[in-house]
């Protein structure tokens, strides 16, 4: 009998160990919409590029910028009656009309003729408007002159023009945030011109993201140190302030925040309003409206809503700069 030798291959059994890629911060910065932007997201790999973010913001400008003569909003302002909107303009106009109704006309995108007359529009202004001019321009200002039918936007008067600068930057933040969501990014911060939206936590510490709120100093038109620091893992924070855009004329400071009901620059005791909301477009729309309402009405308005929180800096009756916040905002501050 032959001796048969079987040479069996030696098989080493065991688990293959893969080293997990570390999560790190990716930062994208740039310029858009007349300001700067910053996107920070946490991932094991680069999933979003600067070119992609710039492309998104350029697309929004082509729809919403009153400074671009070719934009859809400029075409509407130049039109006699109507235009067909794209998704960007339709979303912002519908939200603006909703905010107009919620604020009983305090927020009104048809304020554009008044904004231009006071020197805050795309055209240069040689002189300030007199009372007769204000009365005349107010005949063109009221969102009830706008009608939306699907993507069709119609104006009741040819003189009606819209300016969505009080809401467009917040919307832009939301668009970039949605793009990050589409890439399955779970932790990020998007900021454009100080308007911020957050989702998730800082990595790898897993801490909530901290946001500092700026405050005016003794001179309300000069920025000072941070007033409050809040910690968030979701939602948006935006700020509107009379110290941000203004000029002096005849010994008076003229703010860019125009009250559509009076036709004049905002004269409330409020210096700045910071708003928290689930999304940046909502926060951005209401921060301007609350500035115009004045402190007490604004406080009451926010306290009666579950989706908003607000922090106010104002000048009291003695002329001293002070601050206060809604109960919902104080809860955010206490959770640092």
Image (cartoon, rainbow, N blue to C red):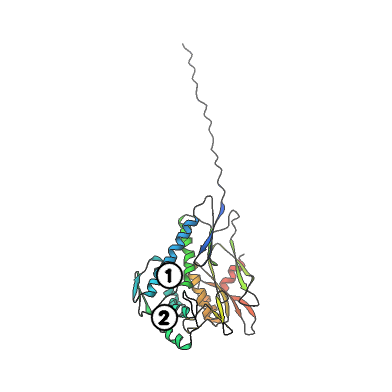
Reading the image, the residue beneath label 1 is 92
Q: Residue at x 54, y 35 (%)?
A: 14
Quadrant hosting residue 17: top right
Disc tally is: 2
Rendered view: 188 above or below 316: above
Reading the image, the residue beneath label 2 is 142
The C terminus is located in which quarter? bottom right
Quadrant hosting residue 331: bottom right
N-terminal label among 2 and 1: 1
Mark 1 burial class by Cα count in 10 Å: few <14, some 14-19, many 20+: many
* Residue 57 percent across, percent down from the top left: 46, 63
* Residue 241 percent across, percent down from the top left: 56, 75
Q: Residue at x 50, y 25 (%)?
A: 9
Label 1, secondary structure: give it: helix
Mark 2 burial class by Cα count in 10 Å: few <14, some 14-19, many 20+: many
Q: Residue at x 61, y 70 (%)?
A: 214
* Residue 83 percent across, percent down from the top left: 34, 71
Viewer-proximal residue, 52 or 21? 52
């Amino acid at each position: 009998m032959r001796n048969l030798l079987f040479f069996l291959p030696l098989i080493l059994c065991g688990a293959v160990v893969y080293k997990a890629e570390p999560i790190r911060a990716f930062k994208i910065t740039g310029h858009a919409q007349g300001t700067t932007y910053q996107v920070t997201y946490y991932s094991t790999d680069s999933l979003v590029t600067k070119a992609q973010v710039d492309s998104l913001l350029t697309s929004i400008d082509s729809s919403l910028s009153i400074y671009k003569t070719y934009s859809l909003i400029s075409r509407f302002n130049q039109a006699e009656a109507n235009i067909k909107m794209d998704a960007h303009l339709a979303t912002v106009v519908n939200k603006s009309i909703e905010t107009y109704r919620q604020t009983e006309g305090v927020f009104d995108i048809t304020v554009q003729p008044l904004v231009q007359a006071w020197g805050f529009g795309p055209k240069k202004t040689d002189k300030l408007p007199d009372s007769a001019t204000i009365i005349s321009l107010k005949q063109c200002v009221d969102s009830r002159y706008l009608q939306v039918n699907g993507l069709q936007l119609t104006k009741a008067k040819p003189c009606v023009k819209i300016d969505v600068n009080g809401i467009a930057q917040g919307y832009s933040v939301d668009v970039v945030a949605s793009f990050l969501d589409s890439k399955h990014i779970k932790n990020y911060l998007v900021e454009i011109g100080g308007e911020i939206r957050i989702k998730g936590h800082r990595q790898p510490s897993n801490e909530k993201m901290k946001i500092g709120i700026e405050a005016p100093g003794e001179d309300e038109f000069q920025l000072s140190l941070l007033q409050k620091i809040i910690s968030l893992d979701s939602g948006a924070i935006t700020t509107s302030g009379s110290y941000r855009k203004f000029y002096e004329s005849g010994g008076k400071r003229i703010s860019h925040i125009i009250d559509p009901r009076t036709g004049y620059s905002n004269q409330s005791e409020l210096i700045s309003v910071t708003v928290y909301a689930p999304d940046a477009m909502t926060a951005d729309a209401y921060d301007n409206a609350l500035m115009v309402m004045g402190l007490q009405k604004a406080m009451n308005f926010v306290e009666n809503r579950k989706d908003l929180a607000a922090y106010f800096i104002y000048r009291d009756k003695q002329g001293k700069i002070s601050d206060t916040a809604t109960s919902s905002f104080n809860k955010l501050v206490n959770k640092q």
